Image (spheres, grey):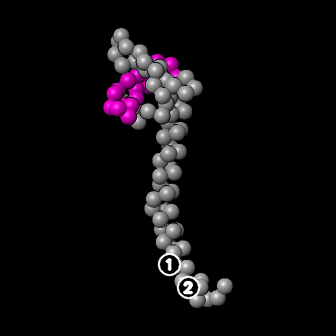
Amino acid sequence: MSQGALAQFLPLILLFVIFWFLIIRPQQKQQKAHKEMLASLKKGDRIVTNGGLIAEVVKPEEDYLKIKLNDDTIVRLDRNYVARKLNEA
């Protein structure tokens, strides 16, 4: 490879590096944090679903969570539909 060819690809390589640090890497960190949060859910934790429902975890299972929506309603929710965990101080 000659110097001219390397000089032509340098802006493209630089663009990819910038793209990696601004978009791909932060998204991977966010996915990792969400996966860790899902793995750490336990009985009594309050969560928000992707549909906006606020519920309490009754029993964590392998792929699902049994959640309590109110005093009378307990349903199963796929873990993939948990948006976040509520932190109540």
Residue 11 location, x and y as percent? 50, 78
- Marks 1 and 2 sit apart, C-alpha to C-alpha, by 8 Å
Inspect the image, locate mark 2, and give the three-letter code of the amino acid beneath it.
Ala
Magenta-colored stretch includes residue 55: yes
Give the residue number, with chain letter if any, for mark 1.
11
The N terminus: image quadrant: bottom right
Numbered marks: total: 2
Q: Secondary structure at mark 1?
A: helix
Let me know if residue 42 appears in the view.
no
Instruction: Characterize the local packing of mark 2: few (<14), some (14-19) or many (20 or more) Cα atoms within 10 angstroms.
Output: few
- Tell me which residue sits at (47%, 52%) in the image: 27
Let me know if residue 27 appears in the view.
yes
Looking at the image, is 84 positioned above or below residue 22?
Answer: above
Residue 6 location, x and y as percent? 59, 83
Residue 16 location, x and y as percent? 51, 68
Looking at the image, is 5 positioned above or below residue 63?
Answer: below
- Tell me which residue sits at (64%, 88%) in the image: 2
- Tell me which residue sits at (40%, 29%) in the image: 47
Residue 68 location, x and y as percent? 40, 18
Give the residue number, with chain letter if any, for mark 2.
7
Give the camera-side residue of 47 and 4.
Answer: 4
Q: Residue at the top extreme?
A: 72
Q: Which residues are magenta?
A: 45-60
| Secondary structure mainly formed by the magenta segment | strand
Inspect the image, locate mark 1, and give the three-letter code of the amino acid beneath it.
Pro
Instruction: Characterize the local packing of mark 1: few (<14), some (14-19) or many (20 or more) Cα atoms within 10 angstroms.
Output: few
Q: Secondary structure at mark 2?
A: helix
Magenta-colored stretch includes residue 49: yes
Give the camera-side residue of 58 and 74.
Answer: 74
Where on the picture, by quarter, is residue 39?
A: top right
Numbered badge on residue 27: none
